[in-house]
Amino acid sequence: MSTTITNNIRRLRFEHGEMTQEALAKTCGVTRQTIIALEAGRYAPSLELAFRISRAFGVGVEDVFQWEEQASRTRA
Amino acid sequence: MLLRRWGIVGLLLLAGLVLWLMLAGPDTLMGLDMGSGGMTLLVAIGWGLLYLLSQWPRGELDRAMSPSEWRAWLGVGFSAIALMYFFTKLALFQGDVAFTDPHVRAVGRNLVILLIAWAVISQVLRSRSKDEVQKDERDREIAIRAGGWGRGATVVAIIALALLLGFSPAERLVLAGHFMIANLLIFALVWGCLIEYAATAFMFWRDRR
């Protein structure tokens, strides 16, 4: 099941010295499988986790996550 | 590589086989009497397998699944074994029996052994991933959704039992004494657990695909 929230986690990881999924998971206090699900667009994170991930990369939440308003409206 | 990848699955299957032999295996196996000596041997094999499992290096398959997913698959396996075992022994609970009956006591004892084995294997798997986060928000979200499936399955089973008992002719219910009804209620509970674990495992698997 895909979500209407897309993200740049994979790109940001590579821009941050090829940070591993495991390292990001540890920093954010989640399992590696949750990072995998996020990158694949199969899971929409809570607001808290979204902030944790963006803080891990030192950027704003909207630099990491985008809400596809059009797709969301079509589904609704 | 293939051996390493499926090694842990093989060990789990072997541990399951040993457990099954302990619970419901034949009295003799390949000419070996499965009396107390055979049982001791089986327990030793089971213990050795668990030790190997705890020492086995983490492979790809091991890494692919989160601790919660491992626990869910383990739950599917053990609750399915418990349900099958319970189902095969259901005939023992027919009519006027009580818990003092030696055959009935043996079923109860074996189910307790199963529960202990489940707890031990869960602990072994937990120790393999002790450095990892054990549960996060996605796990909790999946658990809530799977809980709904489990509750639904329990409700369906209870309603089915109520209809069965309420609408069956009296002569057919002679076999369903108080002890049988009590055990059928436990059966419904385990069924609900199985569906909950299966839903959890399925949702994790679907996210990994």
Image (cartoon, rainbow, N blue to C red):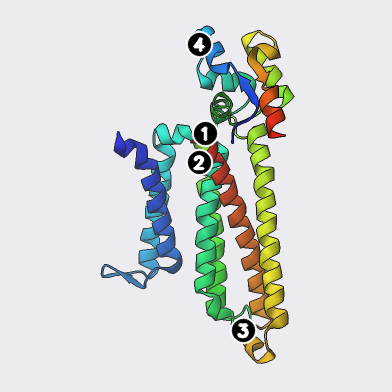
| Classed neighbour count for the residue bearing mark 4: other residues with Cα under 10 Å, few (<14), some (14–19), many (≥20) | few
Look at label 3 and name its amino acid.
Val
Query: Which residue is located at x 50 percent, y 54 percent?
Result: B77
Front residue of A59 and A41: A41
Query: Which is more foreground, mark 3 or mark 4?
Result: 4
Q: Say if mark 2 contacts mark 1, CB within 8 Å.
A: yes
Q: CA distance from mark 3 to mark 2?
A: 39 Å
| Classed neighbour count for the residue bearing mark 2: other residues with Cα under 10 Å, few (<14), some (14–19), many (≥20) | some
Query: Which residue is located at x 63 percent, y 81 percent?
Result: B98
Look at label 4 and name its amino acid.
Phe
Q: Which residue is mark 3?
A: B97
Front residue of B105 and B25: B25
Q: Give me the chain letter of mark 1.
A: B
Q: CA distance from mark 2 to mark 1?
A: 7 Å
Q: CA distance from mark 1 to mark 4?
A: 26 Å
Q: Is residue B41 left or right of residue A71?
A: left
Q: Which residue is mark 4?
A: A14
Query: Which residue is located at x 56 percent, y 62 percent?
Result: B112
Q: Give me the chain letter of mark 4.
A: A
| Classed neighbour count for the residue bearing mark 1: other residues with Cα under 10 Å, few (<14), some (14–19), many (≥20) | some
Q: Which residue is mark 2?
A: B125
Q: Position of residue B92 (x, y in %)?
A: 54, 80
Callout 3 secondary element: loop
